[in-house]
Image (cartoon, rainbow, N blue to C red):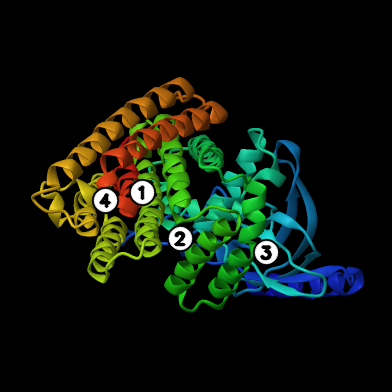
Amino acid sequence: MAAMKKQLWVAVATLVLAACGGSDNVQVRGKVTDQDGTQKQDIQNVRAFAGEGLGGSGSVSAASKVRASSVGPNGSLTLVSEAAVSAQGSYTIEVPAGQERLVLQAVDSSGAVVASALLDASGEVGSSTAAPPMDSESSLEAEVFTQMVVDGAQAAQTDTVDLRARINANMAAAAKQGASSAETIKARVKALAEAVRAAQEAEVRAYSKAGVQTSQSALFSAELSASAKLNAALDAGTGVEAAYQEFYTELAAAAEKQGAQAQEQAQGESSASVAFRATVKARLSAQDAQPLVDASLRAAASAEARTSGAALTAILQASAAASETSTQAGTAATALHSSVSASTTTAAAVQAFQSFSASVATGADVKSTVLGSYLGVNVTNQLVVSGAVQATVTAAATLDAALDTAVKAAVTSSQTDTTKLATGIADAYAAYATAVKAQSTALAAFGTKATPAVDILLVAEGSFRLQ
């Protein structure tokens, strides 16, 4: 009976689209799935449960049609188009060309939302585009975006591509774990919405401090190509891991086009990570929310590991470092990424960053570190370099104290002042950078290597702070 109803929906929808389809429309293809998601941070797998609009098992059989809506002030949804869902979960829906940040919702026969997804951009006139598969991950992303607008964010100024990069399948699976009511889930969505909003503001302010003038809307526009390619790959269902790696690479390239080089990107992500993690921990303090907190913190660690490793590699490439040093740095970056990806607890991710810092600059024997290799440290100059390293460690401790002050001034268990938080974090990191860069004077004897050495110190101790 359910299959017959779906076939009827397909027939009706086809007639409607034939009657009202226009030359200014774009065909969007997609599918509803029963999965948790596709962006995996680690090997841990916590099953999600269907219901409350967050997808999961049973979504395909429950979905009868898909609605495409734009998001207006206060998070209100305005219907743009709708289409039927096949018995296998696939659909094709026509939407106007040139639309951005659409919310796609799969609904059941009563109109209740089963799952949802974000369509960052519909595409050009006459084109065909793919939507992200609807699963628990995509549903959480759509709910978080809508909540951000409800809370006061402007839809047109929100980077939904960045939002999708910050939320992964583990977070989506954990979002319902231990939740006893719909209100509990809504509270978790709201906390994540505040965390993403704070992260995006902190990133832009960090860029500004580094001399990079951009905005979330500008970054979003630059990232749309990466989003479209990822959607197409996920819709095809092949090479998912490779598709995400290409996605992250293209996001980095998009930021670079906005003027943010690898080191500025690392600084921006570090600031965003602190804002995100601090908000999640403060707003989700209940014991039953800890699986979501842990998954969220590890997701932030994974993003920061990518940018920190890339920054270290870029610094050495730009300074024409010896091949041995570059290889050592590549090994450290790879180990960081692998360890964070394999972590099943936040503590394990913290340890990965500590090991990274030690191998790059702060190890007991500075001669064996990446920094030591780059500078050619020996018994004659070892004390000078060790002094610069110790000064950086001290600056990092001061940074942690400043970040803690900024967080306590802006985040409580009931609300987050995202602008105040982002400003405090950006100021703290700027002061840290100034303190570390002052070590270029102590390292002046190394000539042109002094500045890259300071940049290495910034990455080594500036990553994943306020743990």
Question: Mark 2 touching mark 1, by CB under 8 A?
Answer: no
- Give the Cα separation between the discs numbered 3 and 1: 60 Å
Query: Which quarter of the picture shows residue 317?
Result: bottom left
The answer to whether residue 90 is visible is yes
- Label 3 sits on a secondary structure element that is loop
Identify which amino acid the numbered label 2 is placed on: Asp
Identify which amino acid the numbered label 3 is placed on: Ser
Q: Which residue is mark 1?
A: 451
Q: Quadrant of the C terminus?
A: top left
- Compare marks 2 and 3 and give the one earlier in the sequence: 2
**Residue 309 horizontal/vertical position (percent):** 35, 58
- Label 2 sits on a secondary structure element that is loop
Q: Quadrant of the N terminus?
A: bottom right
Q: Residue at x 66, y 39 (%)?
A: 149
Q: Could you tell me how many numbered marks the image carries?
A: 4
Identify which amino acid the numbered label 4 is placed on: Phe
Closer to us: mark 4 or mark 1? Answer: 4
- Give the Cα separation between the discs numbered 2 and 4: 52 Å
Q: Residue at x 48, y 63 (%)?
A: 248
Q: Which residue is mark 4?
A: 446
Query: Which quarter of the picture shows residue 333?
Result: bottom left
Q: Which residue is mark 3?
A: 64
The answer to whether residue 34 is visible is no
**Residue 241 horizontal/vertical position (percent):** 42, 71
Q: Which mark is on residue 36?
A: 2
Pick the residue in front: 88 or 382.
Answer: 382
